[in-house]
């Protein structure tokens, strides 16, 4: 399977981004900012990550630098893990910014 952009992978990353944001909120209690906020941030982060970085996520090389063939299941797993990471990182960044802004007032 060659790395290609598909709508299914974009949807997988968007949904996984929501889950990643909620998982990060469970871990980082002081940076939580509400269920709806986590959902929106995770959805946006997953969508943007899937839109701009989908081909990079799908590229796996072996020791010689050649692209490795990938099954549809592996591609879905790669996209889901990338979406989880994007959503979690975005939630932590937004949560930290909100926490610091609220602390100054």
Image (cartoon, helix red, strand yellow):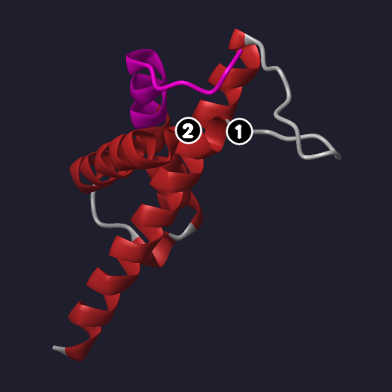
- Single out the residue that lies furthest toward the bottom: 104
Do labels 2 and 1 touch, CB within 8 Å? yes
Q: Is residue 80 left or right of residue 59?
A: left
Image x and y of residue 62, in percent: 81, 34
Q: In this view of the protein, which residue sits in the foreground, 97 or 53?
A: 53
Q: Which mark is residue 59?
A: 1
Specify whether residue 53 is painted magenta.
no
Magenta residues, start to end: 1-15
C-alpha distance separating marks 2 and 1: 6 Å
Image x and y of residue 7, in percent: 32, 16
Q: Quadrant of residue 53?
A: top left
Residue at 59 percent of width and 9 percent of height:
72
Figure quadrant of the N terminus: top right
Q: Which residue is mark 2?
A: 55
Query: As displayed, is residue 53 above or below residue 66?
Result: below
Q: Quadrant of residue 75?
A: top right
Image x and y of residue 73, in percent: 62, 11
Q: Which mark is residue 3?
A: none
Q: Quadrant of residue 61?
A: top right
Image x and y of residue 36, in percent: 19, 41
Residue at 39 percent of width and 60 percent of height:
92
Figure quadrant of the C terminus: bottom left
Magenta stretch, overall SS: helix
Residue at 70 percent of width and 29 percent of height:
67
Count residues near mark 2 (Cα–Cα under 10 Å), then give few for <14, some for 14-19, many for 20+.
some
Specify whether residue 11 is painted magenta.
yes
Q: In this view of the protein, which residue sits in the foreground, 44 or 36?
A: 44
Of helix, strand and loop, which one carries label 1?
loop
Query: As displayed, is residue 27 above or below residue 31?
Result: above
- Single out the residue that lies furthest toward the right: 63
């Amino acid at each position: 399977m060659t790395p290609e952009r598909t709508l299914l992978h974009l949807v997988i990353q968007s949904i996984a981004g929501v889950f990643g944001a909620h998982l990060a909120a469970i871990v980082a209690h002081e940076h939580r900012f509400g269920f709806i906020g986590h959902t929106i941030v995770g959805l946006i982060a997953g969508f943007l990550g899937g839109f701009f970085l989908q081909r990079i996520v799908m590229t796996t090389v072996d020791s010689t630098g050649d692209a490795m063939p990938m099954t549809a299941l592996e591609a879905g797993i790669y996209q889901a893990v990338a979406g989880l990471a994007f959503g979690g990182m975005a939630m932590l960044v937004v949560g930290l910014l909100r926490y610091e802004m609220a602390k100054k007032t």
